[in-house]
Amino acid sequence: MTEPPPSAAARAADGADALAAFRERFRLPLAPDGERAVYLCGNSLGPMPVAAAERVAEVLELWATLAVRGHHSGPAPWMHYHAQFAAPLARLVGAAPGEVVAMNTLTVNLNLLLVSFYRPTRARHRILIERPAFPSDRYAVVSQLRFHGYAPEEALLEVGARPGEELLRTEDIVAAIERAGATLALVLLPGVQYLTGQVLDVEAITRAARRQGALVGWDLAHAIGNVPVALHDAGADFAVWCHYKYLCGGPGAAAGAFVHERHGRDAGLPRFAGWWGHDAATRFAMGPDFVPMAGAEGWQQSNPPVLALAPLAAALAEFDAAGLGRLRAKSLALTAFARQLIAARLAGRIAIITPAADAERGCQLSLRVAGGPEPGRRAFAALTAHGVIGDWREPDVIRLAPAPLYNTFAEVERAVALLGQALGAP
């Protein structure tokens, strides 16, 4: 495949990019030819911040030189290592610092919070999710229903796109919530739908569910660090997310959770208790009775996984330095540029599933190749062979996610040009 040089439009956009310097703060993978790849897969795993190696090395050195004393000494004592993440995470999800905590992994956190926020009764026991939900979320919900003795065939409500459409409609979700009414115990939806990249209206859906007396949880795996979220003001009851996608916290990074302050001081709320969720002031008294910490920290199980959290400290420093407002503006510009190129060069060959409206899309563009899964797989393989790293989701979706911290307009143009060549476009 031949690759034309960047256009004047791409060069101008990159030249005016106020965030351009952040690209060099990340280690980007290499293409088969040994050059830097076009990495458009931060929606699945973010690249490594350069400073992550330093943060991990710092922890290892303290372990080697201080051993157990590292819990109380050094620049970030391990005893309270997780506390440094509360403020930056709260800024990213629109919460108070006491409402968020870095702990565990995403589905572990989901199951722990479902213990507290799915409290079914014979009359009110149904859970509403989207179709298709990310499999792990659906597995967790179905397992909770069965644990409580309810058949998923009756108790699980799924809202999908209308026939012939790709996207969820807010009015359809609200209508399903209203139809379920007093039978609805919980709504669990994604901030950004993983397959289509559609941003859901957190505030409107949360408000609709609470009007019916249902609790509301959000999976922000594809939303945090990608789009603005205001969990506290929206009134969400809880949320969970991972840190290895847009937040670049490393493979399998420790995850995060939000619990609204109206629940955070409810010591009587059912939960699975663990030592690190116990009141910090009396934790080492080693008493037999669990007294939860106020706020989201009261759902912790064990002491923080310091080595797993160290890369996240480096990543969040980059997010704070860039600012979510500037990141969001560049993200919208990158995806708008991609949409314009696809419309101009690949009309009729590529369908963009992701919404066009700014409020309804983040970094990810989900593409479907005309002709079905096989042409799509061939095109995806061709992109990969020429150093464009995205991902494939069955049955027929290519996901490309230009991220504002490290991607350029020239890279977006190159990806579209290579996709066009793979499809035989002139």
Image: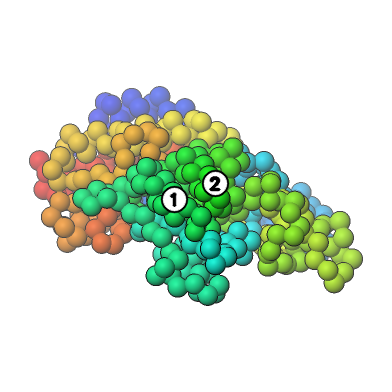
Residue at horizontal 76 percent and vertical 57 percent from the top: 267
Callout 1 environment at 10 Å: few (<14), some (14 to 19), or many (20+)?
many
Relative to residue 156, is residue 343 drawn left or right? Answer: left
Q: Secondary structure at mark 2?
A: helix
Residue at horizontal 30 percent and vertical 51 percent from the top: 161
Q: Percent position (x, y) of residue 390? A: 33, 52
Instruction: Please state which amino acid type lies under the numbered disc 1.
Output: Ile
Image quadrant for the C terminus?
top left
Instruction: Please state which amino acid type lies under the numbered disc 2.
Output: Arg
Residue at horizontal 64 percent and vertical 47 percent from the top: 260
Relative to residue 153, is residue 212 drawn left or right? Answer: right
Q: Percent position (x, y) of residue 74? A: 79, 52
For marks 2 and 1, give the CA distance.
10 Å
Residue at horizontal 69 percent and vertical 46 percent from the top: 261
Q: Which residue is mark 1?
A: 177
Q: Which residue is mark 2?
A: 210
Closer to us: 187 or 102: 187
Callout 2 environment at 10 Å: few (<14), some (14 to 19), or many (20+)?
some
Sequence-first tag of 2 and 1:
1
Q: Percent position (x, y) of residue 266? A: 74, 54
Relative to residue 188, is residue 33 drawn left or right? Answer: left
Closer to us: 102 or 140: 140
Relative to residue 153, is residue 87 drawn left or right? Answer: right
Which of the 4 image quadrants contains residue 103? bottom right
Closer to us: 62 or 311: 311
- Direction right: furthest residue: 285
